[in-house]
Amino acid sequence: MVSMRRPFWYTESEVKPMPIYEYICAQCHKKFEVLRSMSDTSAAVCPKCGSSDTKRKMSTFTSTYEGKVPTPPQWRQS
């Protein structure tokens, strides 16, 4: 997931996509999201209890497919 939030003072050249990472706190089990650079390796801090004992969750997503859905025999031919 990528956020394109723009501050009120932005110019188009200053906007860079930033991933939203999902975390769960090992201490209080709070689930939360953090906007952070892909190169940021520091521990995420829980907004509820302040613990840095957090684990990144596998994010889920959905997508849509426009067009004809292939039937199983077509999958094998590809």
Image (spheres, rainbow, N blue to C red):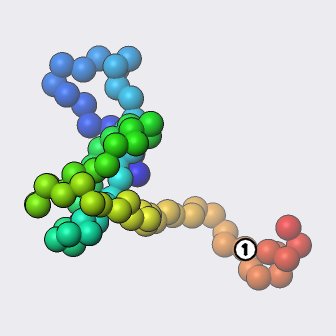
Left or right of 31 in this view: 4: right
Give residue 18's quadrant in the image. top left
Q: Position of residue 16 (x, y in %)?
A: 38, 29
The answer to whether any part of residue 22 appears in the image is yes
Q: Position of residue 19 (x, y in %)?
A: 39, 44
* Element under disc 1: loop
Outermost residue, right side: 77
Residue drawn at (31%, 49%), measured in percent from left and top?
Answer: 43
**Residue drawn at (24%, 65%) of the image:** 25
* Residue 43 placement, left or right of 46: right
Query: In terms of depth relative to the viewer, which is nearer, 9 or 51?
Result: 51
* Residue at 29% across, 44% down: 35
User: Residue at 44% across / 36% down in the picture?
Assistant: 39
Q: Quadrant of residue 50?
A: bottom left
Q: x%, y% of residue 61?
A: 44, 64
For label 1, the residue is 70
In this picture, residue 45 sits left or right of residue 42: left
Q: Amino acid type of disc 1?
A: Pro
- In this rendering, the answer to whether 38 lies above or below 66 is above
Question: Which residue extends farthest left?
Answer: 48
Rendered-image quadrant of the C terminus: bottom right
